[in-house]
Image (cartoon, coloured by chain):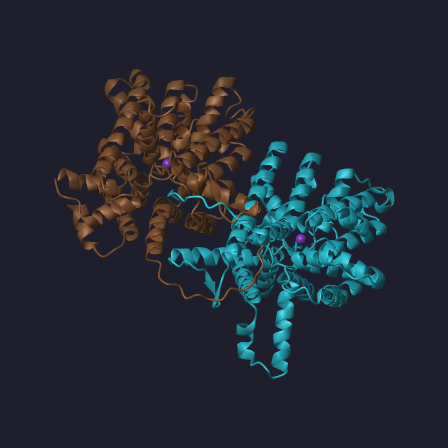
Chain colours: A cyan, B brown
């Protein structure tokens, strides 16, 4: 088997390196398959860079596309795309474990460690259960989403095509891929359709919170039903991670919705012509989709500068860890904000919800944001070097979108030349593996903790 | 006396608050004076917001101007502007101390602490000497700069006007104000003039390094002349602060020059028509001026997107502490970059030049950058709310310029409406006092170091 073979050869590598290479491997193989003639629809041709771009956008669940998915690819091509999205969404590691489980092989200690590290789990026990649970949850959520979409798409497209659209959209939404088979306008035709809006937002938010938050919530809710916990104490008994994720997500979604609503209220090209309720729904959708989903109901190129600024910020932050969302993550933002506030208040320890934030987290957060901003800066400069006439905002939007694996574009993806496509490919790839890999790398290295030689400190000045 | 009176009343405030209020006080009084009719040239009228804007841009040595300095203000107005720039440049604290010295009063312990904290000095002793030295150095440097400019301006404008221009430009350059009396095009007419270029870059770099770096360098160079130190060991014996400042400044200046040269090489509106040597000089000038100087020799609105991106980054970083430059400072950038590299390499301690960087510095650097980015985001959104049709890049450039006290503009300053002017006024003010005040506040609070209640830590996930 390919993955087994790969893992055998990569025996000596650490987790971070295995993840990095696995993603690259799946992308490369996926790209080669998509490059095969039978994946392309009749009358179309696929260049090598477009095939690789599409494979990257699927596996990294980004959603930027250089060719229109609905018309460019054959049925087989679309199935390959669906599969690549699903692989990217669940994550190679989980998928590899599933293969191991289904082959009835015992998971080796090394593989356990790999899964454990990449999902940041605390106990070694129950890993098989965890992975099985992940996969079951994904399929359950996608199934529910598909049913929701079917009510809209089956009447519109007929049974077979409608169901196909529903399944594809549900998988794409839950995996935060944002790729669709509807044409070039994503969900813009459904801007006033509450069913499509609610289903999509539900899937995006659900997967954006991360599995561990759901399990934590699920356990507490079970206790509430068993009358072992009063509903009022539910939030307080959650794990710190869940509290941080829920609070930060709530603030970002609500803040984003309000800002976008205000900035677009009278914009005739976006919300201007809608009723107040529809305006609110479309603003909420835009706020939700920037959490690295990538679908859109309003034209991104028509957004006012104020909304663009808000969206750039939301896209860079992205979703929460252990889900399918990208970006630097809500917990990273929360930790940095809490750290800055603590510092301004002259406190040595960063405290939140009665817990102290470990200083290694603050440093990790710094690394994640620092690396994201560095990659963004370099890739933006790369695009400008290749395409000097590309509009500044569009380039900034495109690459923030790529690094956060968001998939929203102001139209630049369609006009990228070949070298620019490769820059975006690498940015999407770094955006997807970056935080994950870096996190793992930092954690595993920190555990070694080689005895540092203690050097003298010296005064310098900051700011 | 105004400042004495102010200090008496502010007896109970801490240093950070005193600095904040002093700056606001001088700006307000300066604005009121500029608002008086005799400060305005015949045929012009000055609105309250323009008077306050001008006072802020002078005291905060930013350099953004809503009215053309050369034509809008009377001779008295220009002298007031020169004085406000000088006050802003040397710093209120140093100036207040000079008044005390000239009045032959002993500096009280409280005042000493204030100067000490705002200049981050280590010993209490020799404060009077330090302040005297600061002022002498400023005047000496400005004098040398004025002589340099005089060789160019006297033949052009005649003796009196030429000397006036030379003194004004030298003060403005050394104080990093970037305000000029030449008209609307700053130094664009002198883009090919080596004397003006070298004089201006010299003054900007000199003041941008910070006094303490100069003193440190001066001491070592003295030792070299006394044969007590071999020239090869000069850099190694410098203080950590000096090493960080010199290295970071060097990298930024060189990197900026190369990038701008490449991005503008064929741009007919900037470097395109110049010879290679002139191209290099103009690119270097643009790289230097973004270190919060604000003069320009090429039209900022004509820069390519790539250069704009580079300039945005350089403007946000700014100069070094204890000089007249703004921005988050070179040491802040250096500490954050070193911290990220150390983290990626799995090291617990951040080491540079054989010294360990105190973790409180890393936290301070985080605060400085976090606050700068927050203020930038909020002020950009504010401008978009008021002026929705303002070009995205121009607004980003304008406010990065304001927060970094740079003074470069792509033309937005001239078309700001009144509420937008006030947003820029507050951004310039926060940009100037921000890092300084925050630094002082953080340090003084940290020294108290109240016993933190030790809370439990809990695992969360970053990135
Ligand atoms: K996406
Ligand atoms: K300036």
Residue at far top of view: B155
The image shows residue A462 at horizontal and vertical percentages of 40, 44
Q: Quadrant of residue B60?
A: top left
The quarter of the rendering in which ligand 2 is drawn is top left
The image shows residue A144 at horizontal and vertical percentages of 74, 68
Out of B396 and A124, give the one closest to the viewer.
A124
The image shows residue B392 at horizontal and vertical percentages of 51, 43
> On screen, B200 above or below A35?
above
Out of A11 and A394, give the one closest to the viewer.
A11
Q: What residue is rendered at 55% in x and 29% in y?
A: B263
Query: Is residue A13 something one can see in this rendering?
Result: yes
Out of B440 and A423, give the one closest to the viewer.
B440
Q: Quadrant of the C terminus of chain A?
A: top left
Judge from the rendering whether residue B214 lies leftward or rightward of residue A283; answer left or right: left
> On screen, A431 above or below B169?
below
Query: Is residue A262 something one can see in this rendering?
Result: no
The image shows residue B9 at horizontal and vertical percentages of 19, 54
Residue at far bottom of view: A227
Out of A301 and B430, give the one closest to the viewer.
B430
Marks counted in the figure total 0
């Amino acid at each position: 088997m390919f993955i087994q073979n790969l893992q055998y050869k990569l025996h000596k590598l650490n987790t971070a390196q295995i993840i990095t290479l696995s993603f690259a491997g799946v992308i490369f193989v996926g790209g080669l398959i998509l490059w095969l003639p039978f994946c392309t629809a009749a009358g179309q041709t696929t260049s090598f860079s477009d095939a690789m771009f599409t494979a990257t956008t699927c596996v990294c669940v980004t959603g930027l596309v250089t060719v229109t998915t609905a018309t460019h690819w054959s049925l087989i091509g679309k199935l390959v795309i669906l599969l690549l999205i699903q692989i990217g969404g669940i994550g190679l590691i989980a998928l590899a474990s599933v293969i191991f489980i289904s082959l009835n092989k015992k998971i080796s200690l090394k593989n356990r460690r790999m899964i454990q590290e990449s999902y940041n789990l605390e106990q070694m026990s129950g890993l098989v259960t965890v992975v099985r649970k992940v996969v079951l949850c994904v399929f359950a959520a996608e199934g529910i989403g598909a049913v929701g979409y079917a009510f809209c798409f089956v009447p519109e497209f007929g049974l077979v095509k409608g169901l196909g659209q529903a399944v594809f959209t549900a998988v794409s939404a839950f995996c935060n891929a944002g790729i669709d088979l509807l044409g070039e306008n994503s969900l813009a035709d459904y801007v006033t359709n509450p069913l499509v809006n609610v289903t999509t937002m539900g899937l995006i938010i659900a997967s954006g919170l991360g599995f561990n938050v759901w399990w934590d919530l699920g356990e507490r809710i079970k206790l509430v039903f068993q009358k072992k916990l009063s509903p009022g104490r539910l939030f307080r008994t959650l794990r710190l991670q869940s509290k941080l994720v829920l609070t930060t997500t709530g603030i970002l979604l609500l803040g984003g919705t309000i800002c976008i609503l205000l900035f677009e209220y009278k914009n005739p090209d976006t919300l201007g012509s809608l009723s107040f309720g529809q305006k609110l729904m479309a603003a909420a959708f835009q706020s939700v989709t920037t959490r690295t989903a990538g679908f859109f109901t309003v034209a991104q190129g028509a957004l006012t500068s104020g909304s663009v600024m808000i969206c750039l910020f939301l896209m860079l932050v992205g979703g929460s860890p252990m889900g399918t969302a990208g970006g630097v993550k809500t917990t990273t933002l929360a930790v940095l904000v809490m750290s800055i506030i603590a510092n301004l208040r002259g406190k040595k320890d960063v405290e939140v919800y009665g817990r102290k934030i470990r200083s290694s987290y603050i440093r990790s957060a710094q690394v994640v944001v620092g690396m994201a901003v560095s990659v963004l800066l370099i890739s933006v400069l790369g695009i400008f070097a290749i395409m000097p006439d590309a509009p500044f905002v569009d380039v900034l939007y495109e690459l923030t979108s790529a690094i956060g694996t968001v998939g929203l574009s102001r139209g630049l993806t369609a006009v990228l030349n070949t070298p620019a496509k490769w820059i975006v490919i690498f940015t999407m790839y770094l955006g997807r593996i970056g935080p994950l890999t870096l996190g793992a790398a930092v954690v595993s290295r920190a555990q070694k903790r080689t005895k540092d030689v203690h050097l003298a400190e010296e005064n310098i000045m900051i700011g």
